[in-house]
Amino acid sequence: MVLLGSTGSIGVNALIIAKRFGIMVEALVAGKNIALLNEQIKEHHPKYVAISDANDRKLVNHTNVFVGKEGILELLQKTQSYLVVNALVGFVGLAPSIEALRLGKRLALANKESLVVAGHLLDTSHITPIDSEHFGLWYLLGKRPVRGMTITASGGAFRDTPLEELGKMSFQDALKHPNWSMGAKITIDSATMTNKLFELLEAKWLFGVDRLDAIIEPKSLIHAFINFKDGSTTAHLAVADMKLPIAFALVGEIEEPILPSLDLASIGSFSFQKIEAARYPIWEIKDDVLAHPTRGVVINAANEVGIAKFFNQEINILELAERTIKAYRHFEDAIPKSLDEVFEIDREVRRYCLSF
């Protein structure tokens, strides 16, 4: 396999699964964590490696090192592997997703931005999502007609923060996820609920279902529900560990234990909370976004610019959502009809969001 984003949490777990099931790692792509990359090179012996910064090339213990965005695409073109795992973070992951599909490879996709900004232009029949919520939905699907789908959210770092205190919370505060440790961007997106909005868009493109919603389940043990037309509802429960969806994406059907089973008696009870726009302002546009899903590119670009401003203490977390909504409404006519237009709109939205 080819692994893009090998030093992140998805990448690390993907290598654990690859080793367990004897999957050869042909190429590794990483960012700035060269120390961990070198450990992975020593253990998995990839034929090719790519990094983000040319200044780090001399630190990499490998002879075939590619650099930057173009380097990743060149690496993909050289590889023979049928499977590409894209665990890159942000819009930067779109071009490799496009290239992997163009080359006829199977795409195990953890880069949610690829589907958010261009889901209507990608062949989802060759995409397997690496995400606990979408894995849960896929796991539950049978042949019965579906009425709607619901995914769950943890609520993020500010789930229980008094509303009047939200504007005072710092970037570091937003990184204190109540349930697990993830990368900075996805943790911030979890705190704003933008991540869940993205996942609803992903579900729309992956499953072709219009009635989609999300609900807070604080224990993060229930990942998805499917409501069937007959009035019944099924739920997918599992320990919150990405090794399960990764294993299915890399291997196919799994018939051996990946995770321990849940002990429901020890869990005792579950609770659910509605996602409120007062705490998560981005939820104000949820229904409109699902009605106009091709505008996901606008939300993603505005959000990425906003996160950088939040990190630099230029705005607070409530203003982050407000800026995204402002951009979404400003670019209400943005309907990309090609991948070139996706990249063009992304550039325009970023320029706009840097202007205020």
Image (spheres, rainbow, N blue to C red):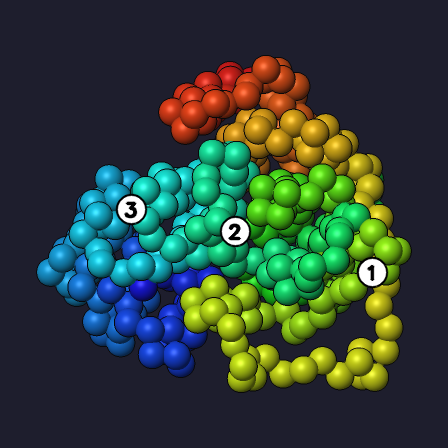
Mark 3 highlights which residue? 103
Dot 2 amino acid type: Ala
The reply, left or right, for residue 124 in relation to residue 160 is left
Dot 1 alpha-carbon crowd within 10 angstroms: few under 14, some 14 to 19, many 20 or more? some
Q: CA gap, disc 1 to disc 3?
A: 39 Å
Q: Residue at x 47, y 69 (%)?
A: 252
In the visual, does 137 lie left or right of 284? left
- Give SS at disc 2: helix
Element type at mark 1: strand
Question: Which picture quadrant has residue 16?
Answer: bottom left
For marks 2 and 3 on the same chain, the one whose residue lies earlier in the sequence: 3
Q: Is residue 234 left or right of residue 335?
A: right
Where's residue 157, x and y in %?
A: 69, 53
Residue type at the position of mark 3: Leu
Under circle 3, the secondary element is loop
Check the image and report above or below for 196 versus 226. Answer: above
Q: Amino acid at mark 1?
A: Thr
Q: Earlier in the sequence, mark 1 or mark 2?
A: 2
Q: Nearer the viewer, mark 1 or mark 2?
A: 1
Please tell me which of labels 1 and 3 falls first in the chain: 3
> Residue 47, percent across and down?
18, 64
Q: Quadrant of residue 285?
A: top right
How dense is the environment of label 2, judged by Cα within 10 Å: few (below 14), some, or many (20 and up)? Answer: some
Q: Is residue 213 visible?
A: yes
Residue 233 disc label: 1
Q: Position of residue 98 (x, y in %)?
A: 37, 40
Name above or below for residue 306 compared with residue 20: above
Location of the N terminus (image quadrant)? bottom left
Q: In the picture, residue 46 is in which quadrant? A: bottom left
